[in-house]
Amino acid sequence: MSPERAAPVLHFLDFLYRIYCFSSMNTEIDRKMDEGIGMLLLLEDKKKLTIGIEELELNEPAPKNSIPFYNVLWVELSNDQITIDYAHHASKTLIKPKKWVFTLAKDDESTSGTPAEIFVKTLMTRAYGNAQSQKRAYVLINPNSGPGGAIKQWETEVKPLFQAAKMQIDPVMLKHGGEAVELAQNADLSRYDTIMACSGDGTPHEIFNGLAKRPDAARALSTMPVSHIPCGSGNAFSCNLYGSHRPSFAALAIIKGVVTPMDLVSVTSGHNRIISFLSQTLGLIAECDLGTEHMRWMGSARFEVGVVQRMFKKKCYPFDLAVKVEIEDKGDVKAHYKHHASSTSLNHLAKKLDADPVAEDAGLPPLKYGTIQDDLPEGWELIPYDKVGTFYAGNMAYMSPDAPFFAASLISDGLMDLVTIDGDLPFFTAIKVLLDVEAEKLFDNPHVTYKKISAYRIIPRDQEDGYISIDGEKCPFGPFQAEIHQGLGRVISKSGKYEAAGPKNWDKVTLADRIHG
C-alpha cells in the first residue's frame, strides 16, 4: 500500500485509539468516583480524612496515618464529631478495637470537602464491600474445648471486636456434648445471619448435624451460614476459612466475611447418616487424634506426640475399599485446582449454587449411592488393601494450623480429596512424609497417593476394634460409606474460598495438564 493510501487508514486507526483511550480514562474516572477514591472530609485543626485506594488516610498535616478498609469496623456521626471504630493489630497474635474521634471543620472551612453524611456512607461501603455489616450471630460457646479458655477468649478477644462492629450477638454457654445439635435443630433461623461456634471443630460438626436434622434441612443448610471462633486443639474450620487459628483474627474475618457455599459429605455408618464438613479417617491419623484425648491440655501438640508414639510400630490397618475416583493423576489434580481456584470461577459457581431453588420443606438430599446397608453400587468394586497406614478423606485443606494435608482441596468443587499412605514404610521415610505435611510438600511426596473422589465405601477387617474419626469425632468402628453434596452448606468465609495456598506450583502445570483440567 502506498503512503498516500495508507495515511487515511492510519488516521482512522489513530482516531479509534483515541476513542479507546478516552473511554478507558472515563471508565477509570467513573470507577474512582463510584468507589469514592480521593473523597475528602475536612476536620478541625487543618486535619483531613481521605478515602484512598485500599485505606482510609489521615493527614494532620504531619506524616499520614492510615487504616486499611478491611480493618474499619464502624463509622458514625454525632453532632459535629465523626467516630471511626477499627481493628488494631496489637501484636502478631492479637487484634484489638480502637477508635479515631475527630471534630468536623466549621462550615466556613469545609467548602472544598465532602458532606460528612456522604463521606460516612461511602467509607462504610468501602469498608464492607460485599459483606453484610451488623451481622446477627447465634454464638455457641464450648467452655471445655481443647486446652480450655474459650470463655476468656470470647470475653477479652472476640466480643469487644463484635461490639465495636455493632454486631448483634446472642451467646449461649454449652453445658454438655450434643447440645449444639439440639440448639441448631430448634433455632429460629430468621433471627440470625450466622450460627457461630466458639470452640474447636466439634461444635461446628454438631451445628451442621443439627441443621441436617431439621425437617427443612436442605433450606437450613443452604441459607444459614456457620462460622467459627477457634478455641480448640485443631481449629481446622478457622484455619481454612479465615487463614488463622487466632480468635481475634477469626473474629475480624467473620465481621468482614461473605456467605459462601461449601461442599458437605454424607457418611452412613450402621443405620445413621452423619454430615461431615472436614474429614473422615481411619488408621494412624485417627489413632493420633482420638487416642490422645487424654492430652487435650497440650493443644494441637498432642497430635505430634501421638504420631511419634505410633510410628515406631509400623502398624498397618487392613481394609476393603470401593472408591469412585474422579481425578487420579496428581498432575490432573493440579490442573483441576488451577481451573477452579480463580476468583472468576469461584464467583460463577457460587452464584450458580445460590440460584438453585430449594423447597421450603426439603430434607437432606437423597443419597445417590445408597447407604452402607445397601448392596455395593453398580460398577463399584471392593479392592483389598493390606498395608495402608493412613486412610484420609478430606473436605478442607488444613486439618490443624500446621497440617495442610489436602493442599488441592477446594471449597465447592463437588469432590473430596483422598490421601493414602502405606504403614510399613521405613521409620525415617515415614518421618519424612509427616515432616512434609507441615512443609506443605505432602502432595508431591512419592510415598503419598492423592486423588479426587466423589464417593467411597470402606470396610475395615482383621481388627476387632479401632478408631474411625469423622470431623475429629469418634465414630463406631465398622464399615461406612461416604458421598459428597456440592455446595450443600453455607459458611462465612474471609474471601469466598479457602485461605490455603494450594499444591506447590499449581499455577505452573503443563499444557497436557491444562487440557485435562
Image (tube, rainbow, N blue to C red):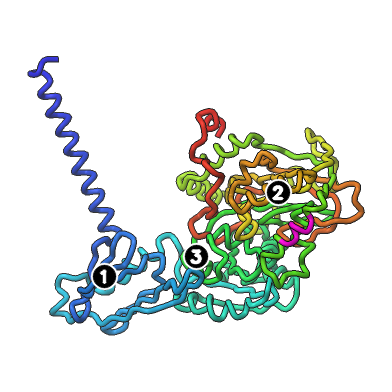
On the rendered image, what quadrant is the N terminus found in?
top left
Q: Is residue 358 visible?
A: no
- Nearest the viewer among 404 and 208 is 404
Question: Please, which residue is most extreme toward the left here?
Answer: 4
The reply to whether callout 2 and callout 1 are in contact (CB within 8 Å) is no
Task: Give the distance between the C-alpha atoms of the residues marked 2 and 3, in whole angstroms.
Answer: 27 Å
Image coordinates for residue 380, horizontal then vertical, percent: 79, 35
Q: Which residue, given by chain and number where applicable, does mark 1 sit on? A: 64
User: Which of the two labelled residues, at mark 2 and mark 3, occupies the earlier sequence position?
Assistant: 3
Q: Residue at x 14, y 26 (%)?
A: 10
**Count of numbered badges drawn on the protein:** 3
- Nearest the viewer among 60 and 322 is 60
Q: Residue at x 69, y 45 (%)?
A: 419
Q: Residue at x 28, y 84 (%)?
A: 79
User: Which of the two labelled residues, at mark 2 and mark 1, occupies the earlier sequence position?
Assistant: 1
In the image, is 34 to the left or to the right of 219?
left
Q: Which residue, given by chain and number where applicable, does mark 2 sit on? A: 393
Task: Say if 66 sits above or below 240 in the image.
Answer: below
Q: Which residue, given by chain and number where applicable, does mark 3 sit on? A: 253
Q: Main secondary structure of the magenta part?
A: helix
Image coordinates for residue 195, horizontal then vertical, percent: 60, 68
Report the magenta residues as a range: 305-310
Nearest-to-viewer mark from 2 and 1: 1
Q: Is residue 34 visible?
A: yes
Question: Please, which residue is most extreme toward the top here?
Answer: 1
The reply to whether callout 2 and callout 3 are in contact (CB within 8 Å) is no
Task: Say if 171 sits above or below 273 in the image.
Answer: below
The reply to whether callout 1 and callout 3 are in contact (CB within 8 Å) is no
Judge whether residue 318 is colored magenta. Answer: no
On the rendered image, what quadrant is the C terminus found in?
top right
Amino acid at circle 1: Lys
